[in-house]
Amino acid sequence: MLATGANTVKLCAMKFGFFSAAGALCAAAFLGCAGVEKPATYPIGVILPMGGIRAPASADILRGMELARDEINAAGGVGGFPVSLEVRDASAEGFSFNEEFDSMRRAGVKVFNLGYGREFITKKALVGKCDDVFVNFMCSYPPITLDMPNCTRIFINGAQEGDIMAKAVKRDGAADVQLVMMNVDDFFGKADADYLGFNLKVDKTKLYRDVFGEGESRFDVFSRQIMRFSSNYVFYVGYGSELRDFVESLARAGYGKTVVSNCGIAEESFTVPAGIKLYSVKTLFEQGRVSGGESKRFVSSYKAKYGVQPSWKSAYGYDSIRLLAAAAEKARLMPSKMRGYFKNLKYDGAIGKMEFDASADSLSELSLVER
C-alpha cells in the first residue's frame, strides 16, 4: 500500500470550469495558433491497438476514458471547452505513427495517450522533441519518462513490477538458486526483463534467459529445455496472452515448481495446472482491495453506464483523462507546463493510490498474488 500525505489529490473534489481573464487569453491562443485548425473542443488523442489480441484491453481503457470525458464535460469541460477523445487504431493496416501523430497535432491535439509497448517506445525521441504536446505513456517500459520534459506515465511501472516479482525468490542458506526468465521479444519485454534480471542476479544465482514472440502458443521446446536446468523459479514477462499456453506447456513437461508473471495487459483467466504454483503481479483494484471514495464512485458510475464491472485497465483509462484534464487546467492549456503538475503528486483515484516522482513517473498499488 502506498502512503498518503496531506497534499493527496482527490479529483472528485476538483472543478473543471472556465478560466480567469488571463486563462481566457491562453484559451484564445489555443484556438488561434497559426497553421492549426480551430477546434470546437479540447481534443485528447488516444492511440491504442484496437484490433488483435490486445483489443479487449484497449476497449476497457477507452470505456474508462469515455466515462471520465462525460463527467468532465458535465462539469464544464477544460478551460471552457468540452473534451473530445480523438481515437486512432495502432493495429490498423497501414498505420503510421509519424503520419497520425503529425496529423493530429495539426488538427489541434495537444495531449496524447499512447499505449502499450513496441508501437511507441521507439518513438520516444521523436515525441520528446515536440514541445507543443504532452504525452501519457500507457506502458510499463521502465525508463519511459526519463529525459523527456513533456510526458508522464499513468499506468503500471515495469520497474516496480520487477521489484515485486524478484521478492518471490526464497533463498535458503548456501543452496544455489536456478532461475529461468522468458520475455516477449520486443523493446517492452526486453527492458522489463532486464530490470527484473538485475534484481535477480545475486550471489549463488544462475539465471537463464530466452525470448518468445507475442501470441506464441507452442512452448514445448522451451519447456523441455527449462526442465534440463532444474529451475527453482520460472519468470514470464509479456503482454499476458501467452501465459496460459506457457504454464500448461510447463505442466506437460513435468515442471512442478514456481512460475512468476508480470501483470499482463492481455491476460485472460484460466485454471492453473496441478503441481505448479503461479504468482502474478496484480493491482489492488483487481483484487478488490481499494476502498477509497473516488474508486467506489468510479465503480458505481461505470457499472451504471456499461452494465459490467470495470477492469483495472478501465480504471487507468479513467484516471488518465481525469489527471490530464486537471493538469491542462492547472497549466492553462499550455502543454509545456503540464509536467509540473505531476511532479511529486500524490493521487487518490479510481485505480487507488498513485505516487508520482520528480520525473513525473508513477508507482501504483500492486502486489504479488498466488493464483
Image: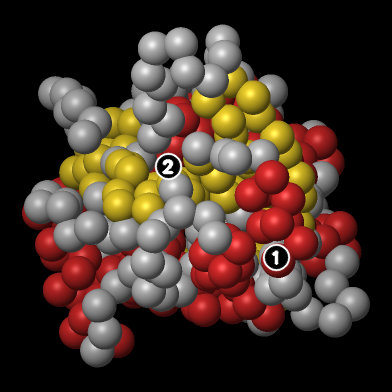
Please name the amino acid that badge 1 sits on.
Phe
Q: Residues within 10 Å of mark 2 (few under 14, many from 20)?
A: many
Q: Residue 40, percent across and down?
A: 56, 72
Report which residue position mark 2 lands on.
Answer: 327
Please name the amino acid that badge 2 sits on.
Ala
Colour scheme used in the picture? secondary structure
Q: Compare marks 1 and 2 and give the one earlier in the sequence.
A: 1
Identity of the residue drawn at 15% across and 73% down: 300
Determine the image quadrant of residue 234. Answer: top right
The answer to whether the residues at label 1 and label 2 have Cβ atoms under 8 Å apart is no
Image quarter (top left, top right, bottom left or bottom right) of the C terminus = bottom left
Residue 83 left/right relative to 91: left
Between 266 and 323, the one lying in front of the other is 266
Image quarter (top left, top right, bottom left or bottom right) of the N terminus = top left
The Cα–Cα distance between marks 1 and 2, rounded to whole angstroms, is: 45 Å
Identity of the residue drawn at 85% across and 81% down: 93
Identity of the residue drawn at 50% across and 37% down: 232
Q: Which mark is residue 309?
A: none
**Relative to 47, residue 94 above or below:** below
**Relative to 24, residue 339 above or below:** above
Q: Residue furthest bottom?
A: 307
Q: Secondary structure at mark 2?
A: helix
Q: Is residue 315 visible?
A: yes
Report which residue position mark 1 lands on.
Answer: 219
Q: Is residue 351 visible?
A: no
Q: Residue 53, percent across and down?
A: 63, 77
Determine the image quadrant of residue 178. Answer: top right
Determine the image quadrant of residue 32. Answer: bottom right
Q: Secondary structure at mark 1?
A: loop
